[in-house]
Image: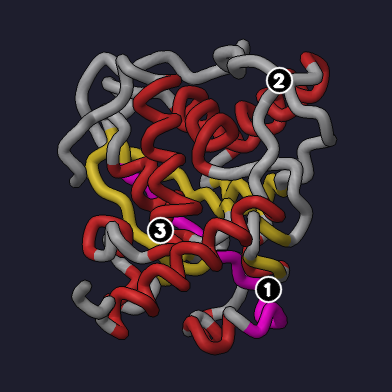
Amino acid sequence: MSRISADRIIGLVGIVTAAMLFFFFAPAQAARPLPDAKIDSPLAQQPGMETAVFAGGCFWGVDAVFKHVKGVIRVASGYAGGSAATAHYEQVSSGTTGHAESVRVVYDPARISYGQLLKVFFSVAHDPTELDRQGPDTGTQYRSAIFFSNDEQKHIAKAYIAQLQAAHVFARPIVTEVTPLKAFYFAEAYHQNYLALHPDQPYIVINDLPKLADLQRQFPALYVRNQL
């Protein structure tokens, strides 16, 4: 019988460890499919580009989810909530900078609305009931947040959260912050498009690939197979 290589053993140990983390920190699922936003912006008459910024735990998975959504033009991982001086991964990871790991979603408002993006965000991109954490990741840098760029986004986001709370679709209260976007700072190059470049990493396999499966299952009309 051939010996198992050291690399394979290390890989198997990593997968088992990640599976144990998922067992203990699995995200809560909504009791039923989330409703469409009652208050939303209508689809634009002409193609264009608008920007939304969301934070929902490690930006790798959130980035990948939105890159598979119809009408999204591009997505980037980065930091929001703090200053330019501390917008670096090592500092953000301390949880003391005010930053949250975030994604900037540039989308065509003629193809998808802000309310539809919110529905994806709350349904599959993260668990909005976890305070200052997401799954195995803990700290304010992993908080759930919506960084709005204008009053319309603020109004739609707050109204949708109130709508979900009233419908009791989650077993626990939603803790998502709705706060103005002061600036978005791009994360380091090695964080960009991380899931597509590291699909076999245990963390990705356990925590993020299920999000893409949920996106395809819950939003077949919005799901785009080819990633941006």
The answer to whether residue 140 is left or right of residue 34 is right
Give, as a three-letter code, the residue at label 3.
Ile
Seen in the picture, residue 68 relative to 21 is either above or below; the reply is: above
Query: What is the x, y in percent for residue 27?
Result: 65, 44
Circle on res. 204? 3
Q: Give SS at disc 3.
A: helix
Q: Which residue is mark 1?
A: 98
Q: Are marks 2 and 3 in contact (CB under 8 Å)?
A: no
Q: Residues within 10 Å of mark 3 (few under 14, many from 20)?
A: many
Q: Residues within 10 Å of mark 1 (few under 14, many from 20)?
A: some
In the depicted view, which residue is nearer to us: 56 or 24? 24
Q: Is residue 105 magenta?
A: yes
Secondary element type, mark 2: loop
| Left/right of residue 82 with respect to residue 129 in the rendered view | left
Q: Secondary structure at mark 1?
A: loop
- Residue located 46% across and 60% down the image: 59
Give amino acid for label 2. Answer: Ala
- Can you see residue 170? yes
